Amino acid sequence: MPELESVRTTAEAIGRIKCIKTGEEIGLLYQWDNGETQAALYERDHSETPQGSAHPFEPDIGKKRS
């Protein structure tokens, strides 16, 4: 069985992600114990906003980052 290159077991929140336009906090930035970082955006009910989401796309938060 092949060994995994890097196993992520625990993460620590290291920063807040804010919307550039509104200043509203929209997520957190985590750093895993293997040094990788990952953005996690909050889930929101977009039906409350009359113009829809101010964020037209959602990034792949599972993508490896360095």
Image (tube, rainbow, N blue to C red):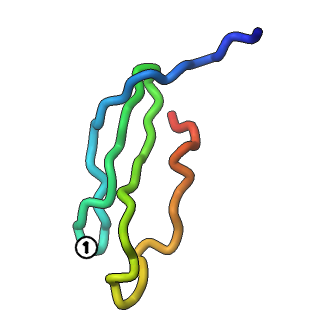
Q: Residue furthest bottom?
A: 50
Instruction: Give whichever of 51, 21 is nearer the camera.
Output: 51
Q: Residue at x 25, y 60 (%)?
A: 25
In the depicted structure, whether residue 61 falls above or below residue 43 = above
Horizontal arrangement in the rendering, residue 11 relative to residue 2 (left or right): left
Along the line of sight, which residue is nearer the eye, 22 or 28?
A: 28
Three-letter amino acid code of the residue under disc 1 = Thr
Instruction: Tell me where residue 46 appears, x and y as whole percent.
Output: 39, 77
Task: Please give the count of numbered marks on the rendered protein.
Answer: 1
Q: Is residue 27 above or below residue 11?
A: below
Res 21 → quadrant = bottom left
Q: Residue at x 39, y 89 (%)?
A: 51
- Spot the residue most to the right: 1
Residue 37 on image: x %, y %: 44, 35
Where residue 44 appears, as percent x and y from the top left, is 36, 67
Task: Please tell me which residue is depicted at 42% across the width and 83% down the height of the picture.
Answer: 52
SS for dot 1: loop
